[in-house]
């Protein structure tokens, strides 16, 4: 009998559930919400379904004790939550692009328990969610293994901006320029587009162009890791914007460069690390951050912002999230 049922929208979203499931003591499985999520996880069993995305029928057929989402896909359109408790834990804790309010509004009628990455999210959840939704701060489960990871010291930089279509990130405005900057340098660049920008236009065409170009550049590598944890563990500096990867990266304590060239007219990149437009970014800045870390002014700002986020960074977020999920198991 499946007691804990995860619903995976996209294959890369499995990372949250896999981290939590290590500490779940009940029988668990996942159901794919899209065709691309079939075969997503090697550690969590997949439930065979006759129709991908028919979540109401599938939940009632499986009859779990609790359903766990880390996405917003058709949450308020479903009805299974009228009979089964639904726990929501975030996939990606983006900062500065209205994600908190959007998630709460799109899941508010369905969720019973919301697991927040930090106090910043919890306080907004409590303002937006209905009064009968419980909110608990657990941290970022998929980032636990970054807490104790040693700095590699291999002159490796990870470029990982948020997606264009859904996040309005900096990818379309910075990808070519970042390759130009690092080509032929003594740094290794890990080039990591968001999964959505590998499959959907206009990002997909740019990704194909960059992949072809990178094949001819020895010190630039197209990052093929399915989830970003291994890439972050292997990198000394992150180049991003306000992607959820930033929140995970904060667990490393390593320097962050935030590119301000986002496509969205509505959102601004919050000042956490070293913020800069791509035209003003140079290798000298990368070298100083690599060798010396943040200057005092930025270090103080980053520490203050991390405190404001209120994320418990102790490597036990997945344990706390699992305990909350298990509290719903009969």
Image: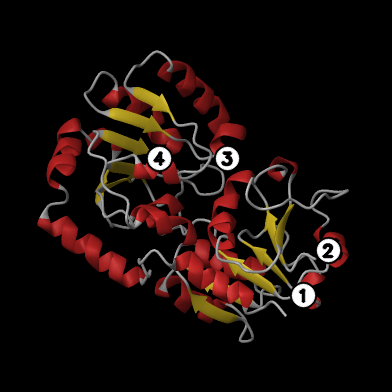
Pick whichever of labels 4 and 2 is earlier in the sequence. Answer: 2
Q: Nearer the viewer, residue 285 or 85?
A: 85
Could you say where residue 186 lies in the image, as x and y percent from the top left? 21, 24
Residue that carries the numbered disc 2 in the rendered image: 62
Q: Residues within 10 Å of mark 4 (few under 14, many from 20)?
A: many
Compared with residue 60, is residue 16 higher up or lower down, i.e. above or below?
Answer: above
Secondary structure beneath dot 4 equals: helix
Pick whichever of labels 3 and 2 is earlier in the sequence. Answer: 2
Q: State the CA–CA distance, disc 3 to disc 4.
A: 18 Å
Q: Nearer the viewer, mark 1 or mark 3?
A: 1
From the viewer's perspective, is 94 left or right of 38? left
Residue furthest top in the image: 216
Who's the residue at 65% across and 66% down the image? Answer: 106
Q: Nearer the viewer, residue 300 or 117?
A: 117
Compared with residue 288, is residue 184 higher up or lower down, i.e. above or below?
Answer: above
Residue that carries the numbered disc 3 in the rendered image: 196
């Amino acid at each position: 009998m499946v007691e804990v049922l995860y619903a995976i929208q996209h294959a890369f979203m499995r990372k949250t559930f896999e981290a939590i499931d290590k500490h779940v003591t009940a029988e668990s499985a996942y159901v794919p919400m899209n065709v691309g999520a079939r075969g997503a996880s090697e550690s969590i069993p997949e439930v065979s379904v006759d129709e991908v995305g028919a979540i109401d029928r599938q939940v009632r057929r499986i009859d779990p004790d609790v359903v766990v989402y880390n996405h917003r896909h058709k949450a308020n359109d479903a009805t299974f939550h009228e009979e089964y408790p639904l726990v929501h834990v975030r996939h990606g804790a983006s900062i500065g692009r209205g994600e908190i309010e959007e998630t709460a509004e799109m899941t508010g009628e369905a969720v019973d328990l919301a697991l927040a990455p930090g106090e910043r999210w919890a306080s907004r959840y409590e303002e937006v969610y209905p009064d009968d939704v419980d909110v608990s701060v657990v941290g970022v489960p998929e980032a636990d293994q970054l807490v104790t990871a040693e700095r590699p010291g291999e002159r490796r930089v990870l470029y990982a901006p948020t997606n264009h279509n859904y996040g309005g990130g900096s990818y379309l405005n910075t990808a070519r320029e970042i390759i130009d900057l690092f080509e032929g340098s003594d740094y290794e660049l890990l080039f990591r587009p968001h999964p959505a920008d590998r499959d959907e236009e206009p990002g997909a065409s740019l990704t194909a162009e960059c992949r072809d170009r990178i094949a001819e550049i020895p010190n630039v590598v197209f990052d093929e890791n399915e989830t970003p944890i291994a890439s972050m563990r292997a990198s000394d500096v992150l180049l991003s914007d306000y992607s959820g990867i930033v929140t995970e990266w904060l667990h490393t304590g390593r320097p962050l460069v935030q590119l301000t060239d986002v496509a969205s007219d509505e959102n601004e990149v919050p000042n956490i690390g070293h913020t800069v437009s791509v035209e003003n970014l140079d290798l000298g800045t990368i070298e100083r951050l690599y060798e010396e870390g943040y200057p005092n002014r930025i270090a103080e700002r980053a520490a203050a912002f991390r405190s404001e986020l209120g994320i418990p960074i102790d490597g036990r977020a997945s344990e706390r999230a699992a305990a909350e999920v298990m509290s719903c198991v009969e």
